[in-house]
Image (spheres, rainbow, N blue to C red):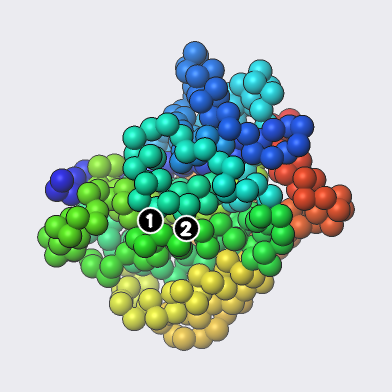
Amino acid sequence: MPLAPFKPATALTMGVELELQLVNPSDFDLSASASDMLHLLGRDRFPGDVKPEMTESMIEIASDVHTRHAPLLAQLEAMRDALLAAGDRLNVALCGGGTHPFQRWFHQRIFAQPRFRELSGLYGYLAKQFTVFGQHVHIGCAAADEALYLLHALNRYLPHFIALSASSPFFQGVDTLFDSARLNSVFAFPLSGRAPFLLRWEEFEQDYFAKMEKTGVVTSMKDFYWDIRPKPEYGTIELRVCDTPLGVGRAAALACYLQALCRTLLERAEPAPAEDDYLVYNYNRFQACRFGLDGALVHPKSNETLSLREDILATLERLAPHAAALDSGAALEELRQVASAGNDASHLRRQHAETGSIEGVVDAAVRRFREESA
């Protein structure tokens, strides 16, 4: 089918999607409880949107469209509290984190929905291995060309979001030595990675998407697992590199960081994005996944090697006027603390060291998700 027309949105609006783990509170393994959870939540009005994901051990929640930090955070907290209440009734725990530390992919069940069955048939075991959990952030764009500009202008900042959100150091029972092991699972899909370098929607639609559709490889934008992709039906760009944080407060802060970055990029004061920016893209992405805040990045324009942590702190400082205009100063302050004190991957490793147990890591994630509401 033809690519959906780009539906302009109010610039710099934002929305958040979170993929969450459903956990058995007895042994802390994943619990195939999505159908029961969705049925129970469907009895009453849920303060947002909730839907199934690829396997029965995960669900996805989505916020409404917001312009400010406080209302976004309030809605995410309300959704979390509704999920916790439902989970308590079903004896199912919930938590964030980009991967479950010890689940076995072959135990997972594909959710009984046509698209998920189709993907399972196409991708085989990769579909079950896709039981990983991410945060997606949508930013509204007033025009299609503006969306493509932001998509590519953000390439240099993608490692910031990977490092700040990283919460998947453990996978298949071992410490992977990555702060974000989740993105390695995403990268296995053939239509992952970066979007093609096109800055005009007409070229994207006719010279790229139409040709891809003609090959039969894709039918819609859902078939692309890019790190950032346009969503024409919403009038947004969608950032997809974040692990699901352990608490909804950090999820709201990351969304506001992206909003503030887009606001400054739209001033067009920085050099325009170029194809050569992507020469260092995969290296920078790897550094953020592997080392988190302790990683390095190569600036795509100057080729200077920078400390990722220091680059984040400098960027947060530079964004202060934009955060003030957007009422998101508290959100960016939280991320300053993360950059200084450590991300969720560091927290989970500390919990593993203290408990000596991989199950204790999940217990810590469950408690963090719940205790944030206290």
Q: Which x, y percent locates residue 16?
A: 46, 42
Q: Is residue 67 left or right of residue 162?
A: left
User: Dividing the image into 4 quarters, which one contains the C terminus?
Assistant: top right
Q: Which mark is residue 26?
A: none
Residue ranking furthest to the bottom = 303
Location of residue 239 with respect to 208 vertically, above or below: above
Quickly name the residue at label 1.
225
Of residues 315 and 82, the one drawn nearer to the viewer in this rendering: 82
Quickly name the residue at label 2.
186
Residue ranking furthest to the top = 43
- The answer to whether residue 243 shows anywhere in this view is yes
Q: Which x, y percent locates residue 323?
A: 50, 53
- The answer to whether residue 331 shows anywhere in this view is no
Local crowd at mark 1 within 10 Å, few (<14), some, or many (≥20)? some
Amino acid type at image mark 2: Val
- The answer for how far apart the CA atoms under marks 2 and 1 are is 8 Å
